Amino acid sequence: MYELYGMSRTRSTRVVWALEELGLEYRIHPVDLSKGAGQSAEFLKLNPAGKVPVLIDGELVLTESAAICTYLGDQHPLAGLVPRPGTTERGQYDQWSHFVLAELEQPLWTIGKHTLAFPEEKRVPEILAVVPWEFQRAAAVLDKRLAGREYLVGDGFTLVDLLAAHTLLWARAFKVPHGIASLDEYEQRICSRAAFARARRREKAEITTKQGDRG
Ligand SMILES: N[C@@H](CCC(=O)N[C@@H](CS)C(=O)NCC(=O)O)C(=O)O
């Protein structure tokens, strides 16, 4: 049984969604960031960064949403949701998951930090003028990759599509449009998967807080 520490509509959604795609059993431990639970001594022992998601698998404690998704896919190779290590497809899968985290997500997180997450005295409002442009540039690169294909890697859905679509959804929540219709279609196609609806239901039942929608 996997143990997930998370909060609804944060990056831990990615892990709930991946667990649902893989049909795995898991228990959710709510971490209410709005009440400072990420900074409790107990939680900091699991993740000194005080952030969700955290996945526990036996002795292993894993942080970082993309790494957790890839680990779960590797643990359950027959599902075919993460290409096998050492293959061309795995190289491409790793390339695009790093791209999503480092290029596509970062401008959005910059907005999150400078509007919500950082203490007010650390926020730099001027930065908000440039980050939508940075996000749109990354979104255009993603769209170019998707030209003539339904998924980022190979012929079928992999967990990197989950990471990308969740990040596009996050952009919507932050009201940062990329203005690319084909990318909207891709996001809707991936987010209409039954596993995502199950993940949302499970989050709603077990870890929803009054914090609101963070993506
Ligand atoms: N790169 C990490 C980022 C994790 C992260 O920043 N999580 C946010 C929620 S989406 C969090 O826990 N923030 C609490 C804080 O910054 O104190 C990942 O992808 O897992």
Image: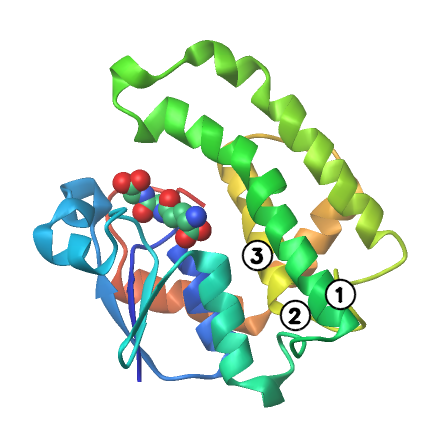
Which residue corresponds to mark 1? Answer: 153
Q: Amino acid at mark 1?
A: Val
Quadrant location of the N terminus in the rendered image: bottom left
Residue 82's place in the image compared with 203, above or below, is below
Between 121 and 190, which is closer to the camera in this rendering? 121
Give the residue number, with chain letter if any, for mark 2: 158
9 shown above or below 91: above
Q: Earlier in the sequence, mark 1 or mark 3?
A: 1
Cα–Cα span, label 1 and label 3:
13 Å
Q: Position of residue 92 (x, y in %)?
A: 74, 62
Does the residue at mark 2 contact the one at mark 3 (Cβ under 8 Å)?
A: no
Q: Amino acid at mark 2?
A: Thr
User: Are there few (<14), some (14-19), or many (20+) residues within 10 Å of tag 3?
Assistant: many
105 vs 115, left or right, is right
* SS of the residue under disc 1: loop
Report whether 190 appears left or right of 72.
right
- Residue at the (61%, 40%) spot, across then down: 104
On the image, the x and y values in percent for residue 132 come to: 61, 24
Dot 3 corresponds to which residue? Answer: 163
Q: What residue do we see at 69% from left, 36% from top?
A: 138
Q: Answer yes or no: do the residues labelled 1 and 2 have beta carbons within 8 Å?
A: yes
Circle nearer the N terminus (1, 2): 1
Q: Position of residue 91 (x, y in %)?
A: 72, 65
